[in-house]
Structure formats: C-alpha cells, structure tokens
Amino acid sequence: QVQLVESGGGVVQPGRSLRLSCAASGFTFSVYAMHWVRQAPGKGLEWVASISYDGSNEYYAESLKGRLTISRDNSKNTLYLQMYSLRPDDSAMYYCGRGRQLVADSWGQGALVAVSS
Amino acid sequence: QSALTQEASVSGTVGQKVTLSCTEAKNNIGSYTVAWYRQVSHGAPKTVMFGNSLPSGIPDRFSGSKSGTTSSLTISGLQPEDEADYFCSTWDYSLNAVVFGGGTKLTVL
C-alpha cells in the first residue's frame, strides 16, 4: 500500500525559510519520480516542483523558481521541499505525490504552511 | 488561468451518467498520460483515473477517454458519494511542467 506522509508544515514569518519532508513507504521509492503540489485556501491544485527518480533532474514552476529546492534521499525514502523567502501567498496545503508517466498517481495527506507575521 | 480547461460546475441526479471534460489548446493531452483526481471538502486528492486505468478501489462506473485535445471522465450511475471537486492533470512538454485544470465541482442532486 503506497503511503506518503508529509511533515514540517507550520506557521512561519514572511521572509523565513521552511523545509517540508515526505516520508514514503509501501513501494520502491528510488525508482519513482516525485512531485510537490500545493493548494491555497479555496483554490485549485498548483504544481510546485518535480524530481526524477535519482534526483538528477529537477523541475520547478516558473513563478517559484529561485525560492525552492526539491531534493530526495533515496536511502531514507524521503522527499524534501526547501522553501526560501516565504510570502503570505505561499500559504497553502502542500501535497507530495508519487510520479508515474510524468504525473502523480498517489498523494499524501498534506502539510499545512501558513506564512504570517 | 489554468493550462487545462474544465467546466466550473456539473450536476446530475442519482443514477444519471455525467461526463466531465478537460481541454487544452496544445497537444499534450494527446501525447501524455492524463490523470483525474477527486477531492472532497479540500481533503487530500485521490486518483480516480490514471490514463485508461482505474486505480484499485475505484468503482468501474468511472471511465476515461481521450479525443484529440480533450480528455473526459465519465461517471455512470452517479452516487451521492461522487459529489466532489474533480481535477485533471497532464505533462506540458513545452513548459517542462505538470499542469492542472481549474477543477469541476460535481453536485449530486
């Protein structure tokens, strides 16, 4: 059973950094690409970033480039999203998803990030 | 504005067949896998259609199809528990990005 568990969310002040983690289990993590997607309150799903199975390729939403780093540790079955210079409009639920054929086929429950002073 | 266009809202009665559509101006839908996700009350997304495959646990009254630049999700025999927001997604080759539709709110009357 695929299981993805996000952690690291919380309340953070504008301009600060935050790192989200996504612990994967129930599948061979090292052979799958992974995605981060977010959803602001009352809004739709917004793609944030993706990373290839071995971490050699990273892809970012154009609007977020320069403020994010996606990474993974295949030895720990864990995906990360490091966010910098956070702004109030970064407030959202952040979901990690397992990648297959370039889109996500399974999702975690999400980590809530609130950027507020 | 979303890269993929979906109806803002669709409604149907119990037992009815409804079709949700996902259209784009490019040709990514024709070239790449389209996934459909259901989201209830802004909870975690759940995949209800992946390409032409039905994920485990999704009833077979859900079906998917593609024609040109449009992907469709059909629900036959609509049930009250099908009421949710539905999002489509695919890969955009020119953007090197995952793209989503704006979502369709399905109401079961």
Image (cartoon, rainbow, N blue to C red):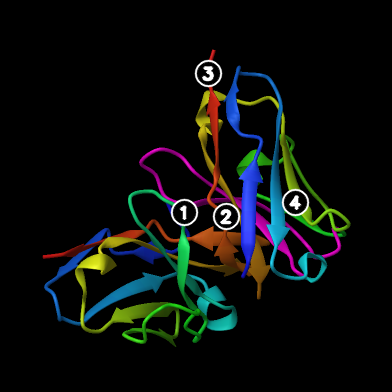
Q: Residues within 10 Å of mark 3 (few under 14, many from 20)?
A: some
Label 1 close to label 2 by CB (< 8 Å): yes
The amino acid at mark 4 is Leu
The amino acid at mark 2 is Gly
The CA span between labels 3 and 4 is: 25 Å
Q: What chain does mark 2 sit on? A: A
Circle 4 residue = A79
The CA span between labels 3 and 2 is: 24 Å
As drawn, A47 above or below B77: above
In the displayed structure image, the side of residue B38 where residue B80 appears, left or right: left
Label 1, secondary structure: give it: loop
Marks 2 & 4 on one chain: yes
In the displayed structure image, the side of residue A49 where residue A28 appears, left or right: right
Circle 2 residue = A108
Label 3 close to label 4 by CB (< 8 Å): no
Give, as a single range, the part of the protein colored magenta: A32-55
Q: In terms of depth relative to the viewer, which is nearer, B67 or B109? A: B109
Label 3 close to label 1 by CB (< 8 Å): no
Marks 3 & 2 on one chain: yes
Circle 3 residue = A116
Label 2, secondary structure: give it: loop
Q: Residues within 10 Å of mark 2 (few under 14, many from 20)?
A: many
**Residue B44 bears which disc, if any?**
1
Any magenta on residue A38?
Answer: yes
